[in-house]
Amino acid sequence: MSTPSRPRTGSAPLAVGLLVLAVIVVAVVILALAGITPQRLIQSFYPPPAATDRGKDTRALYDFVFVLAAAIFLFVEGWLVVALIRYRRRPGDDDLPPQTHGNNLIEMIWTIIPTAIVALLFFFSWQTLNKVDATTVKPQVRVQAEAARFQWTFHYFDENGKEAFSQPLPLADSGGGMVVPVGQTIHVTLRADDVIHAFYVPRFLFKRDAVPGKENAFDFTVEEPGTYRGQCAELCGVSHDAMLFDVKAVSTGEYQTWFQEQVSKAQATPQPRQPGPEPSGGQPGPGQAGGPTLELGAQAIAFSKSTLDAPANTPFVINFNNQDQGIPHNVAIKGADGAEKFKGSIETGPKEIKYNVPPLPAGQYTFFCSVHPTTMTGTLNVK
């Protein structure tokens, strides 16, 4: 009785190698056609360059962990390849190799080495976390970042801890942003009144939550001038993607000039105006003529109208109905020069309020929500 011949296995490793090579070639071609260069591929595994002192500590920790993980991966995969080639089945290999049932020395080694690696990672992570969380007793700049669906507002404080002014424009291209001096310690406190938000700047390699009812704080020092885009990194609602902000780092001299300009604007004496109702956020007082009433609502983070018409040189009333549950809105007005002419009180919906607007000269103005100036805006025609 003849014994059936065994299939030849000598060519199997070669076939597997050719298959792997073909897969690699196809993957490289696909990446090339997609415009993904080796440099971009490598950068996708790495965070962006750090722009702050604490960001550099975070980057150093990432580099250490990445190199250690890469070394372990190459070591393990290298020995797997060696084992696959060295101990592959060859023609005539009909018997099982010697079987080993337990080895105390090897088991101790593969227990001690991972434990040592985890302890090392814990030590360096703990050190970096302490550096990132460290705060200065006397920071040179104090800012409160207030997050509300779906906008950021920055409140600046003087050396005595008193609020000097607020910056409701979060983006540099709209004339705002969080302006800070290069090389100085910035102390930021985070506040949220509605839901959880997060302060995240990719170039800072840092994220911290803004939690209602709790004040979180952190310090940082920007080392290079520039504009760094930030965003809310917690899903906070339907317009979460609109919660962008800029951190604009300038020289100390530029910052001092900008700070004094903002203080002067905040302390500017209002210009004399014609008799009429006060520009407040409430009902007209006794004996005051409210003037014509303009109806305006807010729902789904949008105004109900994109244009309003008002008479020139005559006070008027904006009957504002905020229908957004739990979301703060208001109505503010600015002229063509960007100067703010009126700002109504911020009210959390649902709520209806009458804003008494003082007389405005003929012209075209912009009305907007101070909390959401990038998404809630319209045109006021005064004629």
Image (cartoon, grey):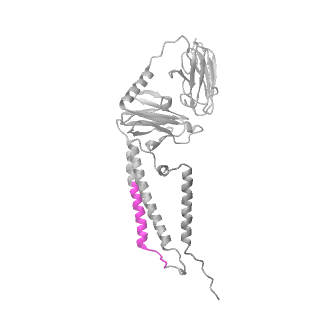
Residue 192 makes an appearance in the image: no
Residue 336 makes an appearance in the image: yes
159 shown above or below 220: above
Q: Does the segment drawn in magenta span residue 111?
A: yes
The residue located at (56%, 73%) in the rendering is 11
In terms of depth relative to the viewer, which is nearer, 6 or 373? 6
Q: Does the segment drawn in magenta span residue 148?
A: no
99 shown above or below 45: below
Q: Quadrant of the N terminus?
A: bottom right
375 horizontally vs 86: left or right: right
The residue located at (45%, 17%) in the rendering is 269
Q: Residue furthest left?
A: 138
Locate residue 139, reporting x and y percent.
36, 35
Which quarter of the picture shows residue 360?
top right
The residue located at (37%, 50%) in the rendering is 127
In terms of depth relative to the viewer, which is nearer, 283 or 49? 49
Locate residue 27, reporting x and y percent.
55, 56
221 shown above or below 176: below
Locate residue 372, reporting x and y percent.
55, 31
325 horizontally vs 131: left or right: right
Q: Which residues are magenta?
A: 98-122
Locate residue 282, reporting x and y percent.
57, 20
Dominant secondary structure of the residues highlighted in magenta in the image:
helix
Q: Residue furthest bottom?
A: 1
Q: Give the mark count.
A: 0
The residue located at (36%, 31%) in the rendering is 252
In terms of depth relative to the viewer, which is nearer, 84 or 182? 84
Q: Quadrant of the C terminus?
A: top right
